[in-house]
Image: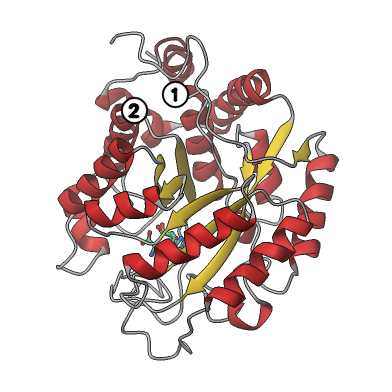
């Protein structure tokens, strides 16, 4: 089959074979990308209209026990001033967000043991008590199943944990030896079983990535059926072992986003900050390739420079109000609009399922 036929097959069957994925990633052309974008955009408009959900990210700690080779806040980067936000500071971020229409708060941070289950549950419960109409998303990396369960009990709704790559050797290349793909997969499985709306995902163009590893990613995503997928280009950070690596391709990122939308028609798919950093039009382009979520920053302005996962991160000098205003304008420019609401995952009648299952 040629690439056009493969994209059509994906649209009908929501499944491709490994070799078919490899072919697509190894040989796709601009025409293929545009064709995928068109189909993906139609699906998104059918399922979400021209509504874009927005979530506010609160980067509440940059202290991390891990040493991921791509990440600017890795443990061995001594050039970062480390910080933790306290409960009052986190609540102030949420208050500013709520005032500006945010109805999902994403607590993201390094793997910081100071934030025990007890402390996390206190924060989550406090946010849910103050804003019962809001969703809380967590993005705090790997923890025990018990920990995930307690935080879910405390009111957390969603969890983002990118799998980063579904290829074991590639996973080991990106991470210190203490981190294992099998553990990441177990965490993801536990999160979903507990009842979180769960997100996996990856960086496009991470060092060592290939059409073969991407094929494994797509097969994993199909099997896992996440409610969310986080996917942006890899961008090097000057204080990491990957400082001299090339940044991920914007075109390939957009192609992948479109393919994710076609494979999982109802998935919540953010047009990421990394995509907006790699290209001025990135976030708009993401939406035009089937994305339906945007995640502006709600962190206190003075700590943002210390939460640089990669160099030149976009939006680091914007207030909650400015951040959402810019998104609003960008979306209007392409005929979309941001909506105030939690924007939960909803499964459609006959979609997001394998026709061969
Ligand atoms: N500690 C949490 C949150 C990590 S930051 C966790 O491990 O899940 C969220 C995501 O940012 C990561 O999963 C990774 O995919 C992405 N990221 C990290 N460094 C990056 C870089 N240099 N370029 C692009 N994305 C990066």
In the picture of the structure, the residue carrying the numbered disc 2 is 222
Q: Taking the image as drawn, is residue 255 in sight?
A: yes
> Position of 143 compared to 251: left or right?
left
Label 1 residue SS: helix
Residue at left offset 72%, top offset 56%: 98
In contact (CB < 8 Å): disc 1 and disc 2: yes
Residue at left offset 40%, top offset 73%: 244
- Distance Cα–Cα, label 1 vs label 2: 7 Å
Q: Quadrant of the N terminus?
A: top left
Given residues 326 and 1, the one toward you in this image is: 326
Is 79 above or below relative to 223?
below
Residue at left offset 60%, top offset 76%: 88
N-terminal of the pair, mark 1 or mark 2, is: 2
Q: Taking the image as drawn, is residue 274 in sight?
A: no
Ligand number 1: quarter of image = bottom left
Label 2 residue SS: helix
Label 1 residue near ligand 1, CB within 8 Å? no
In the picture of the structure, the residue carrying the numbered disc 1 is 263
């Amino acid at each position: 089959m040629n690439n056009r036929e493969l994209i059509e097959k994906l649209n009908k069957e929501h499944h491709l074979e490994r070799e078919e994925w490899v072919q697509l990633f190894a040989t796709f052309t601009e025409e293929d990308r545009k064709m995928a974008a068109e189909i993906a955009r139609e699906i998104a408009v059918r399922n979400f209209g021209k509504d874009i959900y927005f979530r506010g990210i609160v980067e509440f700690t940059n202290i991390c026990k891990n040493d991921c080779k791509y990440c600017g806040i890795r443990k061995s980067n001594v050039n970062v001033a480390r910080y933790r936000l306290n409960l009052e500071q986190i609540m102030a971020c949420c208050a500013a967000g709520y005032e500006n229409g945010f109805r999902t708060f994403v607590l993201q941070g390094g793997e910081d043991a100071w934030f025990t289950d007890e402390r996390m549950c206190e924060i989550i419960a406090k946010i849910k008590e103050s804003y019962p109409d809001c969703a809380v998303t967590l993005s705090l990396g790997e923890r025990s199943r018990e920990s995930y369960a307690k935080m879910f009990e405390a009111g957390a709704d969603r969890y983002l944990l990118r799998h980063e790559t579904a290829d074991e050797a590639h996973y080991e290349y990106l991470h210190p030896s203490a981190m294992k793909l099998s553990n990441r997969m177990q965490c993801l499985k536990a999160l979903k079983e507990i009842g979180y709306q769960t997100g996996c995902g990856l960086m496009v163009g991470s060092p060592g990535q290939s059409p073969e590893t991407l094929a494994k990613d797509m097969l994993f995503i199909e099997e896992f059926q996440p409610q969310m997928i986080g996917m942006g280009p890899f961008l090097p950070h000057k204080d990491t072992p990957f400082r001299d690596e090339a940044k991920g391709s914007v075109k390939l990122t957009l192609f992948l986003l479109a393919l994710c939308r076609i494979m999982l028609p109802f998935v919540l798919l953010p047009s990421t900050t990394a995509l907006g950093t790699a290209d001025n039009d990135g976030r708009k382009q993401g939406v035009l390739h089937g994305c339906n979520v945007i995640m502006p920053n709600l962190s206190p302005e003075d700590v943002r420079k210390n939460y640089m996962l990669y160099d030149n991160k976009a939006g680091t000098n914007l207030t909650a109000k400015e951040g959402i205003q810019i998104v609003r304008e960008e979306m209007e420019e392409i005929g979309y609009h941001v909506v105030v609401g939690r924007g939960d995952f909803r499964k459609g009648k006959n979609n997001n399922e394998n026709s061969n299952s």
